[in-house]
Image: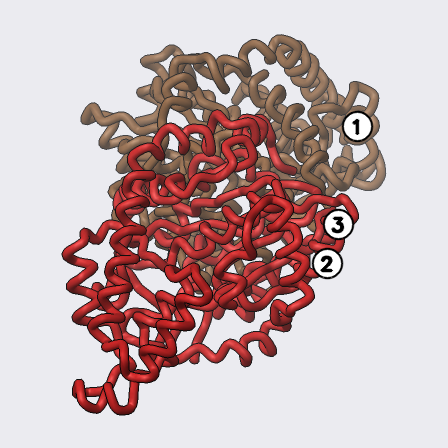
Chain colours: A brown, B red
């Protein structure tokens, strides 16, 4: 197993990561507290929490305690353009949207349109630019709070972040990024200083930053905790998601550069159908007879797992699917058909939202209340 | 001897540096060509060239050849705020001003208000800000071409340079900056990526950049030559000055943090008088009798050397001073008095110019023809 911000290889052992990274599981007490806040806003506890797709945290209990004492936190997440967006990429955004709604807090979304260019040998800035515009619309389609959300590209907002970038970069030496990110003598000097930029938004407010992200991004935020207080800011708080397994099974994470591994947000209905039927790793048996007799294995069946984590909101319904599949009543093809239907209906709605996302994006980036404030600030 | 962009120690052996850095001496043929251009503009060959304060170059012969074929170059120099400016700091600017005048070319002046902050442990950004404003006025007081000069602070212009910064940084790895600048594992990640920023202005035009600077800055521009063509730009050209020796003698270079070593631009008449009389290393003999008998040594006398390089324009006059001093006619105190008078009259004029520099600075930074063009450009 290898998990760092640029690579996930092998079957991910989440228990091991919790220990290695010094995290805590999200426990029942924490879930109860979030549920309470949710219900006050007429929301259910989010599917991703009920199903433990978001499963670990660092100090979120502290952020919650402070919240109940009247001290607000703020949310920060992001997306580095450089490839096509797939379903997995939406997970932190969907979850962050929910957290913003129930806690009613500011949200900063960093679009590091520099990162992938620096890290990927053959990627050009023009290609990144193209992809950035698409990604922005996909993100804006999710609907955040127009006056409490600021989405920014590093290339556009760099001047406002520059003094704070310098202060942060001055606190981090090569040894540290070498140990934290595995940089070496061949790493380019842009990569080497990049981590400071990903940390900056955690300092956008004197309040505490809460960062929902996939667990591979954790190294950045461990580093933040070593320097935050010496710069006059609070240590950040993290809530981590597991990776949605690739269509092909549990090895690694979804990747949009390997078409058999992921459903892209740009896939049409036919492509979705074809991909799921062709690639979705099945826990079903080899023959109809065997399947009816022994049943399918939901613990390795990607279609079931995607339904469980992403699409089947109804707790009774998912239990029923599980039982029917494991008993052999439900066939692999039938399970896949359920997933295809769910994905296509999700993407249909997403594309509808995306059509209207342009004007929303303007609010998030430039014209909303928070955005306007942020363009006036030089962060120091 | 140690010469790098942040430290000059020992007595500098310029012959050795020429060999080590792969440079050429400015030869008589080159001087003839520059003289020709100067005289067309009713200017004499500059004192700094006649006296060989600017003494070496890399490819300036090529830039001249191209110039005579009708291909213009552009000038680039700079100043990193972080300490008080002294007389030595003006040398590249005075020389660049002359080159701009005779060649009638664009000039870019980078004010890296990030560099010293990153490199000096106890320097704060607020202190740098303060010093930057002073430095800008001192530079603007020298009078460049209002429509062909662009002066910019990195912190303000960073957004316009950012794509090109990324492209440049991607071409340079840690091994290279380690070898070129002596960075190590303890170097902070801001320092490590900074060299890319100092290279960017050499790419402001597709034309060739000609960079007058003190020889300690050469490593940046050697590095530029390794990557320029792969980014679609031309290799830069350098003209190097020697260091004006500190008041105390030939070891190291002038430093504004050691008051006995330099005349600051902010020193008043009394301070100048006191410093020269007290600290200027003398080549005179210990007693009046001995001095009259054996004469002074101009090769180690800092007052003579400053007069020679900076203040006594008249070739006959400086020869006369030399002869009189070496013969014992002219006493050390008298020589010092000549220098004091020259410095104070220079500083008086400089301060007068500085009073009117604010409106000029606006032109150089924002409102002149070149400045306006530059603010519209995102360099890629």
As rendered, which of A339 and A132 lies closer to the eye?
Answer: A132
The answer to whether A153 is drawn above or below residue A144 in the figure is below
Q: Position of residue B130 (x, y in %)?
A: 27, 42
| Both labels 1 and 3 in a single chain | no
Q: Quadrant of the N terminus of chain B?
A: bottom left
**Under tag 3, what secondary structure?**
helix
What label does residue A283 carry, if any? none
Mark 2 chain: B
The Cα atoms of the two marked residues, 1 and 3, are separated by 78 Å
Image quadrant assignment for residue A113: top right
As rendered, which of B303 and B42 lies closer to the eye?
Answer: B42
For the residues bearing labels 2 and 3, Cβ distance under 8 angstroms: no
Mark 3 chain: B
Image quadrant assignment for residue A368: top left
Identify the residue at horizontal 37%, vertical 71% (top origin): B305
For label 2, count other residues whose C-alpha is less than 10 Å away and answer few (under 14), some (14-19) or many (20+): few
Identify the residue at horizontal 43%, vertical 56% (top origin): B91
Task: State the residue position of label 2.
Answer: B62
Mark 1 chain: A
The Cα atoms of the two marked residues, 1 and 2, are separated by 73 Å
| Both labels 1 and 2 in a single chain | no
Task: State the residue position of label 1.
Answer: A333
Task: State the residue position of label 3.
Answer: B68
First reached walking from the N terminus: tag 2 or tag 3: 2
């Amino acid at each position: 197993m290898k998990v760092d911000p640029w690579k996930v290889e092998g079957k991910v052992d989440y228990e091991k990561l919790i220990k290695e990274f010094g995290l805590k599981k999200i426990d029942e007490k924490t879930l109860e507290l979030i549920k309470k806040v949710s219900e006050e806003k007429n929301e259910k506890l989010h599917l991703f929490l009920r199903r433990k797709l978001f499963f670990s945290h660092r100090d979120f209990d502290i952020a919650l305690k402070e919240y109940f004492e009247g001290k607000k936190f703020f949310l920060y997440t992001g997306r580095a353009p450089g490839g096509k967006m797939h379903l997995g990429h939406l997970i932190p955004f969907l979850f962050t949207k929910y957290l913003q709604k129930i806690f009613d807090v500011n949200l900063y979304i960093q679009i590091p349109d520099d990162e992938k260019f620096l890290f990927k040998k053959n990627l050009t800035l023009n290609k990144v630019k193209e992809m950035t515009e698409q990604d922005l619309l996909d993100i804006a389609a999710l609907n955040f709070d127009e006056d409490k959300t600021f989405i920014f590209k590093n290339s556009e907002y760099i001047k406002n972040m520059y003094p704070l970038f310098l202060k942060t970069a001055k606190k981090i030496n090569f040894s540290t990024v070498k140990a934290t990110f595995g940089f070496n003598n061949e790493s380019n000097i842009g990569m080497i200083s990049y981590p400071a930029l990903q940390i900056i938004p955690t300092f956008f407010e004197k309040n505490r930053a809460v960062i929902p992200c996939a667990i591979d991004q954790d190294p950045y935020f461990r580093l933040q905790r070593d320097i935050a207080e010496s710069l006059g800011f609070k240590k950040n708080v993290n809530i981590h998601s597991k990776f949605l397994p690739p269509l092909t099974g549990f090895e690694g994470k979804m990747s949009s550069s390997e078409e058999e591994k992921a459903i892209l947000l740009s896939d049409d209905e036919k492509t979705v159908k074809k991909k799921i039927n062709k690639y979705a790793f099945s826990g079903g048996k080899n023959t109809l007879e065997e399947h009816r007799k022994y049943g399918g294995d939901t613990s390795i069946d990607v279609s079931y797992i995607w339904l469980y984590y992403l699409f089947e909101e109804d707790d009774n319904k998912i239990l029923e699917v599980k039982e029917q599949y494991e008993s052999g009543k439900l066939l692999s093809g039938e399970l896949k058909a359920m997933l295809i239907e769910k994905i296509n209906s999700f993407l249909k709605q997403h594309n509808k939202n995306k059509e209207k996302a342009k004007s929303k994006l303007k609010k998030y980036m430039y014209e909303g209340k928070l955005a306007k404030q942020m363009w006036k600030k030089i962060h120091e």
